[in-house]
Amino acid sequence: MTGREPPNYQRVVDDLRWRILSGELAPGDKLPTEKELQQRWGFSTTVIKHALTMLRSEGLIEGRRGSGNYVRNRTPLVRRAHSRDMRKRIGSTSPFARDSEAAGKQPSWESDSKKVPASPRLAERLGIQPGDLVMHTRYRYLADGAPIQLAHSYEPLAITGGTQVEYPEQGPVVGVVARMDFIGVAIDRFVEEITTRPAMPEEADALELDRRGGMWVIEVERTYFAGQTAVETADIVFPGDRYRLVYELPVDPWSPPLNRDA
């Protein structure tokens, strides 16, 4: 007994997916038009549109307004959290710039900083009182001109206020660890909580997500500590198909078991 035939849209999806993953259709190649796909398969417009929507949700293709559908560049940036701010790299290069350059992409970013009172939730994360002033910096990061990451960073002005690193993008060094080292605040750890969720409308716009496909993002809530003091907390948003998060964590050193017969 043979299995059931897959739905018509799935046959189109499977064919185009194979052509993309095999390299027959390379990143940047234009897909056949909806009319051409209809003629090739003999399926309705609804079936073809559904198949293309599935491919967008898988991150394999992207629609360009007035131009058609194209194979996406599937080479993601790699964020290696274990080495993002190693002190030997202190200087003028940000962790994002290092990630981009390692992927062979030109990094750039937009930022805007202003002083705001801490909300109750933010105060809890930073261990300060609601209403205490923090420096809020919004970032949009781009690789080869394409938006690839958003971030909202918050630093207590009780720590950075009046110093050369008060404004994160205007001081002599960049990167949270390097900036805090500069003012004598030694960060010794950071904590990250990772979730996935649908993109908010403003995030979809800022990241230029294809609203006809999947619009899920990875959100990282990160907090840096110097001892028991939180010195920065941030909400970082990545498009799920444009980033790969890599973590390297140490394991306790091995020691031989005690000789119970001794």
Image (tube, rainbow, N blue to C red):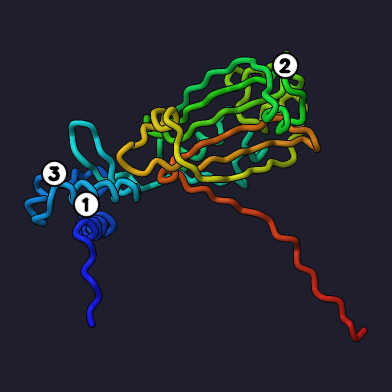
CB atoms at circles 2 and 1 under 8 Å apart? no
Mark toward the start of the polypeptide (1 vs 3): 1
Which residue is situated farthest in the top direction here?
Answer: 162
Q: Quadrant of residue 68?
A: top left
Question: Could you tell me the amino acid type at mark 3?
Answer: Thr
Question: Could you tell me the amino acid type at mark 2?
Answer: Gly
Question: Could you tell me the amino acid type at mark 1?
Answer: Leu
Left or right, 158 with reference to 237: right
Left or right, 34 with reference to 20: left
Query: Could you say whether the residue bearing mark 1 is in a helix, strand or loop?
Result: loop
Mark toward the start of the polypeptide (2 vs 1): 1
Left or right, 248 with reference to 37: right
Mark toward the start of the polypeptide (3 vs 2): 3
Q: Quadrant of the N terminus?
A: bottom left
7 vs 51: above or below: below
Instruction: Give the number of the mark in front: 1 or 3.
Output: 3
Q: Which mark is residue 161?
A: 2
Residue located 21% across and 69% down the image: 5
Q: Which mark is residue 10?
A: none
Residue located 65% across and 31% down the image: 176
Query: Could you say whether the residue bearing mark 3 is in a helix, strand or loop?
Result: loop
The residue that label 3 is drawn on is 33
Left or right, 179 with reference to 213: right
Crowding around mark 1 (Cα neighbors within 10 Å: few <14, some 14 to 19, many 20+) is some
How far separated are the C-alphas under marks 3 and 2?
57 Å
How far separated are the C-alphas under marks 1 and 3?
14 Å
Q: Quadrant of residue 108?
A: top left
Please state the horizontal and vertical placement of residue 56, each as a whole percent of the image: 30, 46
Which residue is situated farthest in the left direction here?
Answer: 39
Residue 133, can we see it?
yes
Q: Which mark is residue 25?
A: 1
Residue located 9% across and 48% down the image: 36
